[in-house]
Image: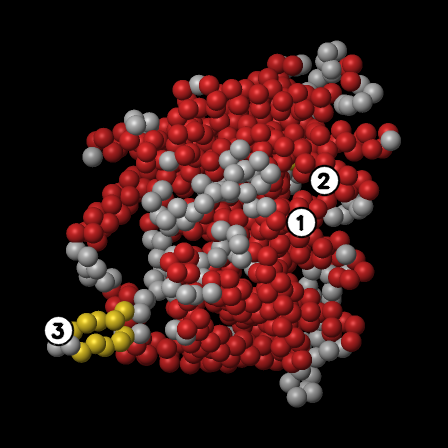
Amino acid sequence: MAYFGELFIGGLTRGSIYALIALGYTMVYGVIELINFAHGEIYMIGAFTALIFASVLTLSGVTGLSVLILAALLAVLYASAYGFTVEKIAYKPLRQAPRLSPLISAVGMSIFLQNYVMLAQTPDFLPFPDLIPELPLLAGFAPLMAPTEVAIVLTTAVIMLLLTLLVKFTRMGRAMRATAQDRNMAMLVGINVNRVISQTFIIGSALAALGGVLIASHVGRINFYIGFIAGIKAFTAAVLGGIGSIPGAVLGGLILGWTESFATGYVSSDYEDVFAFALLVLILIVKPAGLLGREKTQKL
Amino acid sequence: MLLKLKQSLLIALWFVFLTFPLLVIRVNTIEKVVEWRWRNMLVTALVSFFLALAWHHFLEKRELTEQKATAAEGGKESLTSQVWADPQRYRLLLWLGPALLFAFPFFLSTYHISVLTTALMYIILGLGLNIIVGLTGLLNLGYVAFYAAGAYCYALLNHHFGVGFWIAVPLGALVGCIFGFLLALPLMRLRGDYLAIVTLGFGEITRLVLENWNAFSHGPSGIANIAPPGFFHIKLGVYGVTCYLYFLLIGLTVLTIFVVQRLQHSRIGRAWIAIREDETASQAMGIDTAKAKRTAFTIGAGWAGMTGVFFAAKTGFINPASFNFIESAMILSIVVLGGIGSIPGIIVAALLLILLPEYLRIFSDYRMLVFGIAMVGMMIFRPQGIIPAVRRTYEFHPQGKTTGQA
């Protein structure tokens, strides 16, 4: 039973991170119906930026919680900037193009960003400092969960709540939902669609960066390639929950996290990624709309 | 003009900001020193300034041509498509190319022939993937899995049972076909982007299984000492084997071009193109879309399987690392850069993409970086590729005489 609990907590942590990244996929897909292949790379860039700034801050004598907060803020800022720029360069000129074009452009962007970080930084794994300090507040969970795990789960929960409020009740969220429903109609009623799309990319990228910082300080090492696998898994989570749906992304992330955790714990640890991919293939075949997604009829 | 300069300056500043942490700072975590690379900042500023200028220029040009195209429907065809439209004009090239290719081994060293052999393999892979992506419009990001299936088919059969190369070639193709068919079965309900992800997942699963299933595939260390193809029981030296494979691959390339060309204009080929253009409409026209897509997957995969056998025979050693996503992306970029659906384009792109990084060693680090940019840039500024595919057109002459033109 203790082993089960361990796996459960492990899956919960993992799933929360997948959910954070999946939220970006889901939002972007909801608004422009495009799988943003470069999203995993944004997450990786977030982790790298945090690592760089955290190291610079630590070396210049800053300590404690302020390193985490500053590094995370800068990571979020930079990842949002990257997300914004990627959309402007790779997707915006292709809004009217056939569907295959932005998809290929996205794959190209993903390859470019990976190699850009590899060449600019290093192809090797870098150790990531344990930024999340031992807060007395979190110590209460000590026998059950590590402090990083508590931080990850709590952050995801808070963010999901905030995001739901944002989409449901603010002006910006209403504009997003309108654009997702019908872009041309949204334009007609006076919504600045370009701005809405940019906002979506910025929010999605910020969440990915946050996920990157959290997972990197949990796992303890990063390289330029982490975004690829994380990206596919987060996409799996988004599809699992029903792409375009925010609670769906979180649900999907958690289910995926638990599947992986229990499968590696009880079956075999060699095939961790295989389970995730197999789950993805299965879902797409059985229920392409996802658990909470709505079946979409194709418009002619 | 001044406004453009100002805009580009702002964009350059934005990129300086954007690339600051990754390009300028590098932290050595072991020695605990921060390295500031200010020179990179200057380079970024200059490069992005000029790129921004070029970007605006080309976007404007694109808009202009689009306007022109709508103003004069059809309009004048570009020079390249005119050349390719008329078989008379490129027939010379068609004979000269193979003649040159045949002559190469007589005055090039083993290394160069080996490089050319690799390029030929990529041409075949590109043409195979072209059936799936180019003709049918199904974005397959896991094409390398079929290639791996073929390569492992030969390697394992050779390792365990001593099966020869010539038996393995059709077997590899068959295994590729079976893989393609099985993968296609459940996928036919999926739309473009979902299909892309599932094939990507399938490719990764294949690689991971090969890496972890030690009893079957010998794990990450791979399989060594795969027999090179025999020439009527005569043992050939390294040079001999290289030349032999080179000639075989030329033959296979010619065969592939012929088959793809014939397929393209056959009933099933036209069905594929119809599906690419509009799936719903083609269904309404009575095309069995699921069957046509399945066929495309099966045939394309078979081609990859066959090439996999050649790959295993050429290198004599295979391991799962040779079949990663980069490889799929590489083949895809050959198809995309060459011109989706265009045979000459794919040949040119494969030669460019394999030979350039091989001979310009300084750039080989930047190879994937450039591919990435090229894929994005191509989609935006020249979606039809280096040599656009020529569509079959029927011309109507006022005398009431219709002529078909390939």
Residue type indicated by callout 3? Pro
Q: Position of residue A218 (x, y in %)?
A: 70, 28
Q: CA distance from mark 1 to mark 2?
A: 11 Å
Which residue position holds label 2? A259
Asked where in the image residue B393 lies, by quadrant, the reply is bottom left
Quadrant into which the N terminus of chain B falls: top left
Give the labeled residue for mark 1: A278
Question: Between marks 1 and 3, how big is the CA–CA gap?
Answer: 59 Å
Q: Chain letter of disc 1?
A: A
Q: Is residue A39 left or right of residue B150?
A: left
Q: Are marks 1 and 3 on the same chain?
A: no
Residue type highlighted by circle 2: Thr
Q: CA distance from mark 2 to mark 3?
A: 68 Å
Q: Which residue is label 3 attached to?
A: B398
Name the side, left or right, on which B297 lies relative to B318. Answer: left
**What chain letter is assigned to the residue under label 2?**
A
Residue type for callout 1? Ala
Residue drawn at x 36%, y 53% is: B383
Q: Quadrant of residue A160?
A: top right
Q: Of helix, strand and loop, which one carries label 1?
A: helix
Q: Residue B136 at x, y = what percent?
A: 45, 62
Subunit of mark 3?
B
Tags 1 and 2 in contact by the CB under 8 Å rule?
no
Callout 3: SS:
loop
Q: Do pointers 2 and 3 mark residues of a single chain?
A: no
